[in-house]
Image: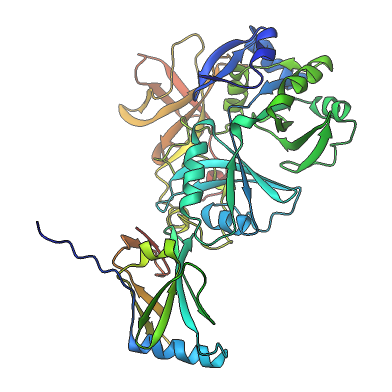
Amino acid sequence: MDPTPLYEAQKQSGAIFSDVAGWVVASSFGNPMGEKKVVQDTVGIADRSHLGRIFARGSDTLDLLNRLTTNLVDPLPVGKGKSTVITTGKGRILDWITMLHHNDDVLLITSPERREAVAEWIDMYTFEENTTLEDVTTSTAMVSLLGPSAESVLETMLGTSVAQLSRLDCMVADWRGHQLIIARTNPSGQRGFDIIGPSDAGEALWDAAFELGASPVGQEALEALRISARLPKWGNELTEEHNPLEAGLEGEVSWTKGCYTGQEVVARLFNYQRIQRHLVALEVPAALSIEPNMPLLADGETAGYITSVSTLTGDSGVPALASLRTAYVELDRVLTIGNVDGVNARVIWVPEFLNEGATS
Amino acid sequence: MPETITPLSIHITEKAAKKVMQFAVKDSKGDEFGLRVGVKGGGCSGLTYTLSVESGPQDDDKIIEDQGIRLFVPKKSFVFLAGTELDFSDGLNGKGFTFNNPNAKSTCGCGTSFSV
């Protein structure tokens, strides 16, 4: 396992570490429930250096990525960002990425496990385009300030306003001799900012935010928030077996931009109402050993399976996400968790486009 | 051991060649003109064809002559196009230039994109 540039700083803050995609990542700082509350109420700082970071450079970069991904990403003015899905010719997910256009470069942020797959895919489809890729994951650090007070802490750190940044807007800032990329994001469903800079700026960023009142937050708390926000994640909801519509990413698909790899399949599934399964949110009972991949049953039939379960109890049960066959997708439907006798889960959210009649 | 024969060229039909000649004359491409044939990422199936009449080849282009027309093929594209026949279908229902590509495992509905 590789340590991130924030390893020592987090160790000193009392981190309990675990392995995420070959990286040593802080799972918590001893109080994940408290860390979750910090993000909801004030401001937390989290190390997200284990995510992939690839610079894409060259005059054809946006055109190329517009042809390879689901969202409209060309034009994408400098200072703007977009999230989009790289799909295969069969419309399956290669990864859900964020593109940040700053200066003359586009920074691609990938899932931790997918940076090599993304780079190889783009490289394979680069023919005569003026586009080059540089994987900077190991030479940069990425920290996130999350929560209602993130903006004021960041502004104090930088000595400049970031209030003008809308979601996924980005800017470059000079800080203590380092050039940082700042982007407004919501990686766990909470408003916040990603800060990307050289590795040797990582610890200083961590310490500066800590001194201004940001509390360390680990992956366990971020996972609980992600699941509550119904955001899919690679390896859980996002796999090469799913298409974007099945994974709750219909909002990342442009229906008007024209062809991209996988477009024909994705458009046909949507227009002819042939989406086989959907991402839904569940509430499952607390204090039970419920894990991803457990089957969900309805009237003795397999209706789907659990994809993510929070380790933290919510207001009225434990939030979870599941992939359900379309016939069983219904608010308040009660499903039996297959491996746990007599234990039920309840559907508490279905994708909004289903409520608009897309598959009715 | 039986010898595997791989079609290593790209062909153009007489009809397609005539059409290319018309474009070259109309656009005054000069005596060294050729048809640049390539592929790029995108289209519904992953790869899509590119065609343009050019005044001359680019460095590293493979040059193939057929039906009196020079075809300029970028090296990386050639792998995906070896054995392809380029045809032209005109008329109201015609599809214009079409590719009969033996490397294509699947083709999208409109025929302009393929996967290998």
Left or right: A286 as drawn, with respect to A214: left
Residue A201 in view, yes or no: yes
In this view, the residue in front, A115 or A85, is A115
Q: Where is residue A299 drawn, in percent x and y?
A: 33, 28
Instruction: Establish if A17 lies above or below A241.
Output: above
The residue at the point 82 percent across, 28 percent down is A154
Judge by depth and name the residue closer to the eye, A161 or A208: A208
Can you name the residue that lies furthest to the front here? B59
Residue drawn at (46%, 39%), measured in percent from left and top?
Answer: A278
Residue A65 position (above or below residue A216):
below
Q: Is residue A13 left or right of residue B30?
A: right
Residue at the right extreme? A159
Rendering coords of residue B4 (x, y %): 17, 61
Q: Quadrant of residue A256?
A: bottom right
Whole-percent x and y of residue B108? 39, 64
Display coloring: rainbow
Please tell me which residue lies in front, A143 or A70: A143
Q: Name the spot of residue A304 as percent of width and height, x first.
A: 38, 31
Quarter of the image where one finds residue A196: top right
Quadrant assignment, res A74: bottom right
> Is A99 above or below relative to B87?
above
Number of marks in the image? 0
What residue is rendered at 47% in x and 45% in y?
A120
**Name of the residue lying farthest toward the left:** B1
Given residues A124 and A230, the one toward you in this image is A124
Left or right of A200 on screen, residue B108: left
Residue B94 appears in the figure: no
